[in-house]
Image (spheres, rainbow, N blue to C red):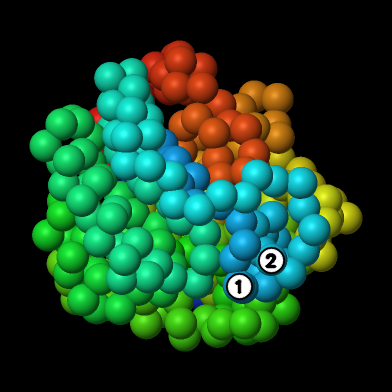
């Protein structure tokens, strides 16, 4: 498959199929990334979206996701705590908003929030929507339709639920819930009128085909905000000895994602700090968004560093 011809077709509105995506896995990386940049520039211009998160409830999760430091199945060296105070969340959101962050997400561990926790957080979201100039996002597991409606009413605009990997590989990373639980959650969030943010984790032993299968599932669901995580192996988890992916493989994955999802927001997420350039090459491979600041259980990259890099590359920070 000729990458340049395929790129030109995409620029003219063509939607590639899975066979074509698989055929560019071994394409010259430099040419592939340059083509992905052209696609991004055509469909997304020079906008770059930055968001931040707060780990508002940590650890003790009932699920056995093999990548996760917060699972109660594993012995990991993380802080465990129940839902933090609303004041702390508001303080964190205000600080991030004042610093230039465009989106702010409250993230909680566990299979789902209780109705009591949902009510507590909805009160916080309502205060945030009145006091902070940021878009509000949420990540609270497998909620019921009513809970999603409550979040929407409280001012949340986007809900996060990663599919993590392909349907076929998913049983190899988690057995306490199924891929379809993810899909149903995404459907329920959309029914409530929420946008959805959903992506993958690279480096869990999956193949390029698994990643491509996941990207096509996200495309079919019309997901526009797609976090791209790189596994940062955590001691105590089943994946603690996984080798960290090389930068070339990450960039190739991002470029292929851009071919499949030309107008999507490809958001650099966990693991970006593992690399010396803090994601520069990944942005040049087709990404156009990032989570800035600390991740859930690992440190991240400061907004100041991200802003300097983004502006140096010619982007304008704006919501996507």
Q: Name the residue: 18% across, 65% down.
A: 150
Relative side of 10 to 37, left or right:
left
- Of the numbered discs 2 and 1, the one sitting upstream in the chain is 1
Is the residue under label 1 in contact with that under label 2 (CB below 8 Å)? yes
Q: Name the residue: 37% across, 70% down.
A: 114
Q: Which residue is mark 2?
A: 72
Number of residue marks = 2
Above or below, 25 relative to 17: above
The percent position of residue 198, horizontal first and vertical second, equals 42, 61
Q: Name the residue: 46% across, 56% down.
A: 108
The percent position of residue 131, horizontal first and vertical second, equals 15, 31
The percent position of residue 6, horizontal first and vertical second, equals 45, 58
Q: Residues within 10 Å of mark 1 (few under 14, many from 20)?
A: some
Q: Name the foreground residue: 32 vs 62.
A: 62
Relative side of 250 to 235, left or right:
left
* Residue 216 image-quadrant placement: bottom left
Q: Name the residue: 51% across, 17% down.
A: 305
Q: Name the foreground residue: 281 vs 81.
A: 81
Where the N terminus falls, by quadrant?
bottom right
Relative side of 118 to 130, left or right:
right
Helix, strand or loop at disc 2?
Answer: loop
Where the C terminus falls, by quadrant?
top left
Q: Residues within 10 Å of mark 2 (few under 14, many from 20)?
A: some
Q: Which residue is mark 1?
A: 62
**Distance CA(mark 2)–CA(mark 1):** 6 Å
């Amino acid at each position: 498959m000729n990458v340049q011809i395929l790129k030109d077709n995409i620029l003219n509105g063509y939607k590639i199929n899975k066979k074509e995506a698989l055929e560019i896995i071994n394409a010259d990386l430099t040419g592939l990334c340059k083509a992905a940049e052209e696609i991004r520039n055509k469909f997304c211009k020079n906008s770059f979206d930055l968001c931040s998160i707060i780990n508002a409830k940590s650890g003790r999760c009932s699920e056995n996701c093999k990548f996760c430091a917060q699972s109660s199945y594993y012995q990991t060296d993380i802080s465990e705590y129940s839902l933090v105070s609303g004041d702390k969340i508001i303080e964190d959101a205000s600080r991030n908003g004042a610093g230039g962050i465009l989106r702010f997400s409250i993230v909680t561990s566990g299979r789902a929030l209780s109705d009591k926790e949902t009510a507590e957080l909805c009160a916080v979201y309502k205060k945030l929507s009145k006091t902070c100039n940021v878009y509000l996002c949420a990540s609270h597991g497998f909620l019921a339709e009513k809970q999603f409606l409550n979040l929407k009413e409280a001012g949340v605009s986007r809900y996060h639920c990663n599919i993590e990997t392909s349907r076929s590989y998913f049983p190899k990373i988690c057995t306490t819930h199924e891929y379809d639980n993810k899909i149903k959650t995404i459907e329920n969030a959309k029914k409530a009128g929420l946008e959805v943010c959903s992506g993958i984790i690279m480096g869990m032993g999956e193949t390029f085909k698994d990643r491509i299968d996941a990207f096509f599932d996200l495309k079919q669901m019309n997901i526009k905000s797609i976090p791209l995580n790189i596994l940062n192996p955590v001691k105590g988890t089943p994946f603690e000895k996984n080798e960290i992916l090389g930068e070339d493989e990450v960039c190739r994955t991002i470029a292929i994602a851009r071919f499949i999802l030309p107008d999507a927001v490809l958001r650099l997420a966990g693991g970006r700090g593992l690399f010396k350039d803090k994601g520069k090459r990944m942005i040049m491979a087709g990404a156009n968004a990032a989570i800035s600041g600390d991740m859930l259980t690992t440190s991240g990259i400061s907004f100041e560093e991200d802003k300097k890099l983004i502006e140096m590359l010619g982007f304008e920070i704006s919501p996507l």
